[in-house]
Image (cartoon, grey):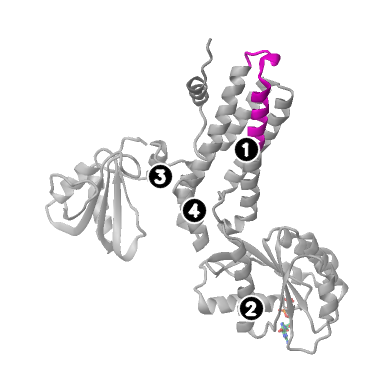
Amino acid sequence: MNNHDTIVAISTPQGIGAMAIIRMSGSRALEIVCALSQKSSFSPRYATLSAIYDGVGDLVDEVIVIYFKAPHSYTREDVCEIQCHGGLVSAQMILQLCLQAGARLAYAGEFSKRAFLSGRIDFSQVNAIARLIQSKSEHMTKVLARQLKGELGEFVEEVREGLLGLLAHSEVMIDYSEEDIPTDIAANITLQLDGLKNRLQRVYDFSSMRQGLVEGYRLCIIGKPNVGKSSVLNAILLYDRAIISPIAGTTRDTIEESIQVSGHCIRLIDTAGIRETQDTIESLGIQKSLQAAKESDIILAVFDTSREFEAEDKEILALLEASKNQHCIIVLNKNDLPQKMDTKAFSHSCNFPYQAISINAKDTQDCAYQIKEILSAILQEDQAGSEVLLTSLGQMQALKATIESLQEALRVWETLELELFSYHITDAIQAISSITHPYEISEMFDKMFGEFCLGK
Ligand code: GDP
C-alpha cells in the first residue's frame, strides 16, 4: 500500500438509486478525471456538468464533477467526486475506467485514514464518522455530529494544554530545591490540578449516565411468572411494527430487539430466561432479573394486580430499590380483571423513585401507547445538553485512566515529589491524547521553552 497512490471507490451504496458518487483521492485524481471527460481542467469546488467517455471514445454517462484542490479536501489531497446516474452499471463502469487510467481501488476506510494521517481529522472524529454511518437514532446522530465537528477534539486539546502547562512547570522546578519553590505557585498548581480532575470526573459521570443516548437505551422487563411480561413485550413490539418500520435483522429468539421512541433507540433486553425457571423463581429467576436489571438503563417491572401481593413481588421491589442508576417503571397489569392487590399498600412499599402505569396488556394499543408516553417523558430528561459526551468504550477508558493518573499526581504533589509528579502527568497526557492523537514529548518541550523565561 502506498500513501501516494491515487485511490478510488464508489462511496454510495450500490444498487438502484437516483445517483451514485465515485470518489478519487491523490495526486493523479484531477488528471484521470480530465482524461475520462476529455476536458483540460476543472475549477475547484464548482459542480461541473461533464461527460465520461470510455477507452474507445463512447459516451458512458453524463455526470457532475466536483474537484477539491489539495489541501482543501477531506484527505487534504486532490480529490475528485464524480456524481453519476445510479443503478448497477454506470458507477461500476466509471470505476473501472478510473482504475484503467491508473487509480487503485481504495481499501475500506482508506479515505478517512488519509484524512487522519494528514491531520485533517483526529481519532475522535474518525470514531464519530464510523459510528455516524451506523447510527440508529436521531439523538445518537446529533451527538456524533457534534463530535465530528470537533467538539470532543477541542475538549481534549484544552485538557492537554492544561496538563502540558503543569508538566512544564514541574520540569522547570525539578531543578529548584524544595524551599525555592514559591508557595503561591505550589498552591496554584494544586488548585489547577484539582479543578481539572473534577471537570474530567464530571464529563466521565455525565457520559456514563448518558450512554443510552449513544448506544441506545437498554430496557428490561422483569416480574414473576405469568404477570404479563411477554404480553407487554409483544404489545410494544407489535404496535411498533405496525406503526414504525422494524429494525432489520433482529428476531425474538436472539437477545435483543430495538424500537424507536421520540428519536431515541431503545434496545429491549430479553429476559425470557426468567420464564423458564418458574419453579425456582427465588433463586435462578431472580438472579436473571438481577443481571438483566444491572445491564439496563430502564427497568420495566410488571405486577399482576389480579393477584395478591406475594413474596416474589416483594423481591422484585427489593431489586428495584437496589437499582439506583436505572429509571424504574412499574407496570400494574391486568386492570381488566377483578383487583386483588392492595395498590395503596403496594405504593407504600416502593421506597425509590419510580413512575407507574395501570394497564391491560391485552389491549395492545393502549398498553404500547402508555409505555411509550412514559418512556418518552423519561428520555426527554436525558438530553445531552451542551456537556461533552464520550461515545465509545475506548474514550471512556482513556478518560478514566487520565483521572486516575491525576489522582496519583495530586497525591505526590503534596509531598513535592516532582519527578513522580511529572511521571503521572505524562501518563495523564498520554491517556487523554489517545482519544484524539498520540502525544509527543516534543510538545512538552515546545510548551516549556515557549512559555518560560528561565533566565539561565
Ligand atoms: P409472563 O409469564 O409474565 O410473560 O406472562 P404472559 O405475558 O405470558 O401472560 C400470562 C397470561 O396472562 C397469559 O395467558 C396472558 O394472556 C394473560 N394476560 C397478560 N396480561 C393480561 C391482562 O392485562 N389481562 C388479562 N385478562 N390477561 C392478561
The dot on residue 196 is: 1
The 10 Å Cα crowd at callout 3, few under 14, some 14 to 19, many 20 or more, is: some
Query: Could you tell me which residue is drawn at 31 percent across and 35 percent down?
Result: 4
Q: In this rendering, would 167 be left or right of 290?
A: left
Query: Could you tell me which residue is drawn at 53 percent across and 32 percent down?
Result: 161
Task: Look at mark 3 in the image and give the residue it sits on.
Answer: 112
What whole-number distance in Å separates the C-alpha atoms at marks 3 and 1?
32 Å
The 10 Å Cα crowd at callout 4, few under 14, some 14 to 19, many 20 or more, is: many
Task: Look at mark 2 in the image and give the residue it sits on.
Answer: 370
Label 4 is placed on what type of residue? Leu
What whole-number distance in Å separates the C-alpha atoms at marks 3 and 4?
16 Å
Label 1 is placed on what type of residue? Leu
The dot on residue 144 is: 4
Q: Which residues are magenta?
A: 174-195
When the figure is inspected, residue 318 is found, relative to residue 231, above or below; the finding is: above
When the figure is inspected, residue 95 is found, relative to residue 114, above or below; the finding is: below
Q: Earlier in the sequence, mark 3 or mark 4?
A: 3
Q: Are marks 4 and 2 in contact (CB under 8 Å)?
A: no
Q: Which percent across, then down, holds residue 261?
A: 56, 70
- Foreground mark, 3 or 4, reads 4
Position of the N terminus, as image quadrant, is top left
Which quadrant of the structure image shows residue 297? Answer: bottom right
Q: Are marks 3 and 2 in contact (CB under 8 Å)?
A: no
Q: Secondary structure at mark 2?
A: helix
Q: Earlier in the sequence, mark 3 or mark 2?
A: 3
- Foreground mark, 3 or 1, reads 1
Q: Is mark 4 within 8 Å of ligand 1?
A: no
